[in-house]
């Protein structure tokens, strides 16, 4: 690892699958890594015996420094990697921003969350990291990395600064890292993945690959992708490659491109589905809802995204449950 990373101090906010694995991989490669998580049982297990994570068929256990609240933190941090979901951003970020302990904040989450985060921590202190790999939370102290893919780091204003390069060097401990000067394009490209694959996984109970293999799932995936692609064009966003595909390929319903994507990400069980299974609030409003909101601003119809939002909220309320049959009902309700 290049000089600088080994002297960095990193706070990981949210010790679930993404945050926990990231923290465990950083341990020993940066000067200090601390996990902040509000689940007391999880925090205790992170400390002793440590986070157990599965990756590529192997199991690892890494003891981590962990705290249950911002009040327990000591020292200062070069980066705070924000891996908690959007409904909890205000509660998590406000005390950290006010503490003066954090030099730079980094969004690791999905959806159109960056502008709201910038309001909470200051636009000059916010970077973004797109996480293309996925993980599953199996319970306190136990997570699994479902897929292997890069992380993409960049500044929201398109600049490249020393802190951008330092963040990338730190995250090399987790896996492949790319620097981008087109972070907005990366955000939207990942949003296309999340709105189509994640949203449909949530309503169907299937992993990404299962959605792509289901005839109505594939039809809905292409329709949702096309809606988001049209909105991104209206936003004048320059979309970037994501998970080995160019976004236009899936807008054109290219089955070979979809197969390439699923070869990388097909085993992903997204957090939105895990949230529904655990009775937690989801991020559907900043994912499918984010596409739909921007679509309304440009007078672009987004019936498939709208329907996913409705279905996920009904499932949050316990009125429906994830099932493959929801894909067929979705195509019937939102299709022409």
Image (spheres, grey):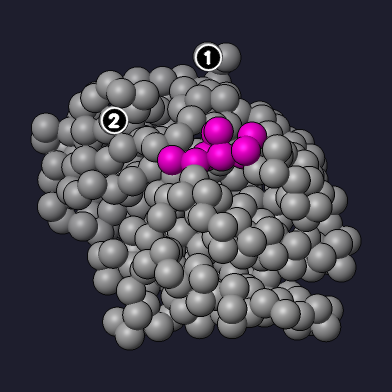
Q: Identify the secondary structure beneath mark 2.
A: strand
Residue 331 belongs to magenta span: no
**Image x and y of residue 302, in percent:** 71, 77
52 left or right, relative to 89: left
Q: Identify the secondary structure beneath mark 1.
A: loop
From what the image shows, is residue 120 above or below residue 222? Answer: below
Q: CA distance from mark 2 to mark 1?
A: 23 Å
Quadrant in which residue 71 is drawn: bottom left
Q: Which residue corresponds to the image point at 24% horizontal and 24% vertical from the top-left?
A: 59
Q: Which residue corresponds to the image point at 43% horizontal and 80% vertical from the top-left?
A: 313
Between disc 2 and disc 1, whose residue precedes? Answer: 1
Q: How many marks?
A: 2
Residue 261 belongs to magenta span: yes
What residue sits right under mark 1 in the picture? Answer: 1
Q: Residues within 10 Å of mark 1 (few under 14, many from 20)?
A: few
**Image x and y of residue 119, in percent:** 61, 69
What residue sits right under mark 2 in the picture? Answer: 54
Task: Assign the C terminus to one quadrant of the image.
Answer: bottom right
The residue closer to the viewer here, 274 or 140, is 274
- Which residues fall within the magenta stretch? 259-267
Q: Which residue corresponds to the image point at 69% horizontal and 44% vertical from the top-left?
A: 255
**Image x and y of residue 201, in percent:** 46, 59
Mark 2 and 1 residues: CB-CB less than 8 Å, in contact? Answer: no
**Image x and y of residue 200, in percent:** 51, 63
């Amino acid at each position: 690892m290049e000089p600088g990373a080994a002297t960095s101090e990193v706070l990981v906010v949210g010790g679930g699958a993404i945050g926990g694995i990231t923290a465990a991989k950083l341990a020993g490669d940066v000067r200090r890594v601390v996990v902040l998580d509000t689940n007391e049982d999880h925090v205790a297990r992170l400390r002793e015996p440590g986070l157990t994570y599965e990756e590529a068929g192997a199991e690892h256990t890494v003891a981590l420094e962990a705290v249950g609240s911002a009040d327990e933190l000591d020292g200062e941090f070069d980066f705070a990697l924000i891996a908690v979901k959007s409904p909890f951003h205000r509660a998590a970020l406000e005390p950290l921003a006010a503490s003066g302990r954090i030099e730079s904040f980094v969004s690791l989450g999905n959806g159109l969350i960056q502008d709201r985060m910038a309001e909470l921590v200051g636009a000059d202190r916010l970077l973004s990291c797109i996480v293309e790999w996925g993980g599953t939370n199996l319970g306190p102290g136990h997570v699994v990395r479902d897929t292997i893919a890069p992380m993409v780091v960049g500044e929201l204003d398109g600049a490249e600064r020393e802190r951008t390069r330092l963040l990338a060097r730190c995250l090399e401990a987790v896996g492949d890292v790319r620097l981008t000067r087109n972070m907005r394009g990366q955000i939207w490209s990942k949003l296309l993945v999340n709105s189509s694959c994640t949203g449909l996984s949530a309503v169907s109970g299937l992993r990404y690959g299962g959605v792509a293999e289901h005839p109505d799932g594939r039809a809905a995936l292409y329709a949702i992708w096309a809606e988001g692609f049209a909105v991104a064009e209206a936003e004048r966003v320059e979309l970037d490659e994501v998970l080995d595909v160019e976004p236009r390929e899936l807008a054109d319903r290219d089955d070979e491109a979809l197969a390439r994507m699923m070869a990388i990400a097909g085993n992903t069980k997204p957090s939105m589905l895990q949230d529904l299974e655990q009775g937690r609030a989801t991020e559907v409003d900043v994912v499918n809802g984010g596409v739909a909101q921007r679509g309304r601003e440009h007078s672009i119809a987004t019936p498939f995204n709208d329907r996913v939002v409705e279905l996920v909220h009904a499932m949050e309320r316990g009125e429906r449950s994830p099932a493959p049959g929801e894909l067929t009902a979705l195509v019937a309700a939102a299709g022409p």
